[in-house]
Amino acid sequence: MLDLFWVEFKRSWLYLRRYPSEFVGAVVSLSILFLLLFLGARFLAGPGADFGERTEALLVGFLLWTLTIFAYNSLSFGLSEEAQTGTLEQLFLTPYGPIPLFLLRNLAGLGTQLLMLGSIALVLMLLTGARLSFPPLVVLPILTVLIGSYGLGFAMASLALLFKRVQQLLGISQFLLIFLLQVPLEGSGWLAQLGYLLPLAPGAHLARQMMSAGAGLDWGLLGLAFLNGLCYLGLGLLIFSRAVRAAKRRGLLFGY
Amino acid sequence: MNAVLEATGLRKRFGSLVAVDGVSLHLAAGEVLAFLGPNGAGKTTTIKMLAGLLWPDGGQVHLLGQSPHQNPGALRHLGAVLEGNRNVYWRMTALENLVYFGVARGLRYQAAQRRARALLEQLELGAKSHTEVRHLSRGMQQKLSLAVALMHDPELLLLDEPTLGLDVESALRVESMVRELAQTGKAILLTTHQLEVAQRLASRIAIIQQGRIVLEGRTPELLGRFAGEHYLIETETPLSPAQLSHLRSLGLEGEGPPYVYHGDSDGLWRLLEALKPTPLKKVARAEIDLLEVFLKVVGRA
Ligand SMILES: Nc1ncnc2c1ncn2[C@@H]1O[C@H](COP(=O)(O)OP(=O)(O)OP(=O)(O)O)[C@@H](O)[C@H]1O
Ligand SMILES: [Mg+2]
């Protein structure tokens, strides 16, 4: 298993090293996206609005969103690409079973994704003059967000497996993630209560609080966030394993 | 004899199309089974069911007693070259592909490295170890696919058209590799449309048509059975029309020379008797090749 992680890890770095233009392209386009959002917000807020502190919060939110998207859609993209090129069936011949393999693949991809995220952060900090600093413990709530995103990613990958062309849906659903990351859990209204059950929401809330409000780590809430993440991961895996069965029954593991 | 592969009563339908209809196959160590049939007969569909990639609607598959449909661990015993030319990652080198898939099949990293290098040498791809697959020729890619299937040294190999697109030399090389692998005790199932290859390699033949196995048996026995009562006759001098019509009534066929006779040896002697005293050039039992058997069996339906 460790060796499998290692070859998956090497594979993701090979692609990065061999095709750096894709990496640069992603960094550039995501940075431009942020700048558009940022300038757009400034424009809407009108002249004189001082963003100051808000810029940092915006940037943090954006980076978290980007990380979530990577975790969420890389599996689906990988699957539909490999169904097209024909390597998907060879993957399904692994005696480890497809789910452990894809889990490891997700995990192994984290390295290059973090590198990409770091590059985007650096570019944007230079361009906007924002300074990011966050308490080290914030990685814990972010981890729960990641776990939940992988769960959603597996659910989405099920659709990719069965219906092949899901790029459109992926694109749109990425914006839903923004909503999930921003659900306010403050207050005691029904929305706040519901928020704890929504995927990603508790972890994102916790991370936001720690970074912008300088709050300490709420361990109780962290436990809840982990539970939430693991539940959605479990759900995603369950859906995915059913999708694999359906795909094998209908002969959908191969190209179009 | 212990069965490496035991498949019974496999059935698969796609919508209203019955692609595979009650196929049973068994394969023992050291055997090469050529799985033949016209386009769309259900060969690839069957192979995918054997590899656990497609769920059969009915029937069972056992690889050394384990079902790949229930237990992915059973796949340790199986290596496959699947139809089409994309069994490997185009953006990785030959060596990287082998190591990756070797580990994905359960090898340790170091072992996979060693095995990959050895296989590359054996397949004369050593010089291309560090070339990305997309820059390899089609035949080289095909050889690499075979190497991927061999990485974890499985007991059973499923090869769907392994010599497709190979040049003469490479095809012969793959052929001799298959032969060597069988000699070392691997069980091999291969499909091909090159019947000469099948005839040279296969210890057994199964012909599938419209999802059903229409003929199965040991290669020499099959050829013998079909060659059976089939003789070629040539005379030194042409036959007169009167002679010919008499001989035709005794079963002589063809517009000749040579003429053909179908029937048992008693009938042949009667025919030769009637030919007397025409000088004979040749009387021979016809050699039949797999192509003729195939055409007869497949044409019959
Ligand atoms: N996933 C699928 N969905 C629907 N029909 C399919 C699917 N896969 C195969 N078929 C159909 O099943 C039949 C058998 O196909 P198969 O690929 O097994 O043939 P084959 O014997 O391998 O032919 P060839 O010699 O051309 O490779 C064909 O009619 C094919 O169209
Ligand atoms: Mg086929």
Image (cartoon, coloured by chain):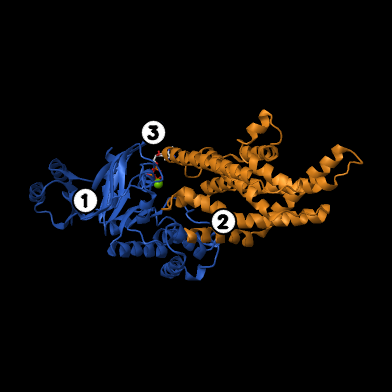
Chain colours: A orange, B blue
CA–CA distance in space, label 3 to label 1: 30 Å
SS at mark 3 in the image: strand
Identify which amino acid the numbered label 1 is placed on.
Leu
Q: Toward which corner of the image does residue A38 lie, by quadrant?
A: top right
Q: The disc numbered 2 marks a residue on which chain?
A: A
Identify which amino acid the numbered label 3 is placed on.
Leu
Q: Is mark 3 within 8 Å of ligand 1?
A: yes
CA–CA distance in space, label 2 to label 1: 53 Å
Question: Which residue is at the front of the view, B233 or B224?
Answer: B224
Q: Toward which corner of the image does residue B168 lie, by quadrant?
A: bottom left
Q: Are marks 2 and 3 on the same chain?
A: no
Q: Which residue is mark 2?
A: A108
Q: Residue B220 placed where, x, y %? A: 21, 55
Identify the mark at residue B17; answer none if there is no mark: 3
Q: Left of B66 or right of it: where is A103?
A: right
Identify which amino acid the numbered label 2 is placed on.
Ala
Q: In front: mark 2 or mark 3?
A: 2
CA–CA distance in space, label 2 to label 3: 42 Å
SS at mark 2 in the image: helix
Q: Which residue is mark 1?
A: B222
Q: Residue A154 placed where, x, y %? A: 54, 43
Q: Residue at x 64, y 44 (%)?
A: A203
